[in-house]
Image (tube, rainbow, N blue to C red):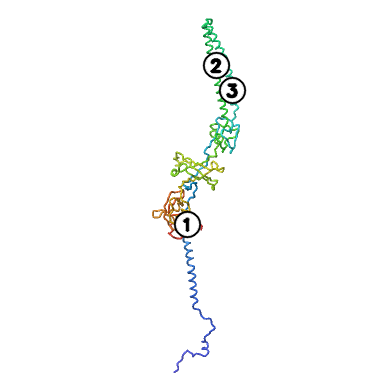
Amino acid sequence: MPIHTDERPPQVGDLAQLRIDRGAVPRRRWLPWAVLLGLGIVAAAVYPTARTYVEERRAPEVEIAHAAQPVASTPGGSTDLPVLVATGYVIARRSSDVGVKTGGRLALIGFEEGTRVRKGQVIAQIEHADIDAQLEAARRGVAEAEAQLAQAVASRDEDARNLERQRALAKDGIATTATLTAAEAGAQVSAARVKSAEAAIASARARVRVTDEALENTSVRAPFDGVVIRKRAEVGETVSPFGVAGQATREGGAIATIADLRELEVQTEVSENSIGKLKPGMPAEVKVQAYQDQAFKGRLRDIFPSADRAKSIVEVRVSILDADARVKPEMTASVTFLEPHAPGGSGAASAGAGQAGGQVPAQAVILVPKRAVVEHGGHPAVWVVTGVTASRRAVTLGKERIDQIEIRSGVVPGEAVVLNPPPTLTDHGRVRVKGS
C-alpha cells in the first residue's frame, strides 16, 4: 500500500541555493563586547573626577581667616597688641568759652571762626563812653585832692612857725598861756587837715583805679594762645555775664569759644567691666571717621577718678601725639588701646619654628578671630584648612584682644582657620572655601 507524505524530495534548483557566498560581509560577534569594554574604560577614567566633583559639591562651605602675628611697631622691637576699642569725640585739652565781665552793647568784634589769637589780645569791646566820663571825673578828683593837700600843707607849716614864735615869747614872759595854747591847737588842726587831704588823694586815686578796671572789663581778652572755633555774638548785640534772655547760645555771656589746637585729645567712655584693662600712659591708635585710612599715635592721658553709675562707664582721655590740620574738635574718633608686648623673635623665625615642631615659641603672639575657636572635649580647638581639607587642632589660648584671641600654641602664622565652623565638619574632611 503506498504511503502518502507532504515532503517532497529536494529539487536540483534548491540544492544550488545552498552554496557558500564568499563575497558576503562576515558577522562581527565581538563588537558589542568591545563597546562595553570601551564604556568601562571611559567610566573608570571619569569616575575619580566625577567623585571629586560630587564630593566638592557635598563638602560644607566655610569662611576662613589667616592666623596673624602683629607687626613690630615700636623702636625697641616690641609688639603692640590691641586690647580694647572705644569711640568718642576729638576735643582740645584747653578750650574756653570766653565771655564778658560786664553787661553792655558790643561795639567791636575782632575775630571770626578760625582767627588765631594771642594771650592777652583784645578780641572784643563793649561800649564804654559812660565809663570814660567816670574815669575822667575820677582823675579830676585826684587833681583837686592834690590841690587841697598843698593848701593844707602850707597852712600846717604856717601854724607850726606861729607855734614856735609863741613858745619863744612865752619863755620870755611876753606871751600868755592862752595864746600859746591856741597856737598849739591851731598847729594840731593844720596837721590833721594835711592827713585828711592825703587820705582824700588816696581815695581819689582808688576811684581812678576802680574806674580804670571797669573800663578794662569792657574789653574781652584771649586767655591763651589759640584759635577761635566758634563765634557767638555780633556787633550791636547786648550781652551780660549771666546771659541774655532768649539767647540760649550765649549762656553765661560767652561771645566766643577759643581752643588750643596744638593739644588735641579724644574724650571717650569705657565700660566698668573693661576699665581694668587700661592704665595711664599706655599707647593707643586713633582714627577719625573722616580719614579712616590714616592712623594717629595716641597715649592714654587720664582715667577719671569717678564713674557714672547710671551708665556704668568711666570717662577716659587719650592724647593725640601727631595730630595735623585735618583733625578738628568735635570729630568722631575711634581709639584702639594697645598693650606693649615684650620683645621677641622675628615673625619669620617664629613661623619657621612653628612649622618644624607644630608649636609657636612663647614670645611669639599669634592672633585669630574669636569666631574660629570652638570647644572639643572640654578643650579649645580650631579647624585648620590645608588645601581642600580641614583638620581639628587643639590650641592653647592667651588673652582676648577685642574680637581676636591669642593662640599660644597649636597654630603658626599664616595658617587658615575656619570661622564659625559648621557642625558638619569632619576631621580631615573636604571643605569648600568661600570665594575660591
Q: Amino acid at mark 3?
A: Arg
Q: Which mark is residue 139?
A: 3
Q: Amino acid at mark 1?
A: Val
Reading the chain from its start, which is encountered first: label 3 or label 2? 3
Q: Report how far apart the C-alphas of labels 3 and 1 lie in the structure.
A: 91 Å
Reading the chain from its start, which is encountered first: label 1 or label 2? 1
Instruction: Where is residue 160? Give x, y as percent.
Output: 54, 12
Query: Which picture quadrant has residue 223?
Result: top right
330 relative to 129, above or below:
below
Q: Which residue is mark 1?
A: 62
Q: Which residue is mark 2?
A: 194
Residue located farthest toward the top when viewing the structure as drawn: 173
Instruction: Where is residue 25? Give x, y as percent.
Output: 53, 81
Q: Amino acid at mark 2?
A: Val
Q: Residue at x 56, y 22 (%)?
A: 205
Q: How many other residues sit within 10 Å of disc 3, few (<14), some (14-19) or many (≥20)?
A: some
Q: Is residue 244 visible?
A: no
Give the SS element for disc 3: helix
The quadrant of the picture occupied by the N terminus is bottom left
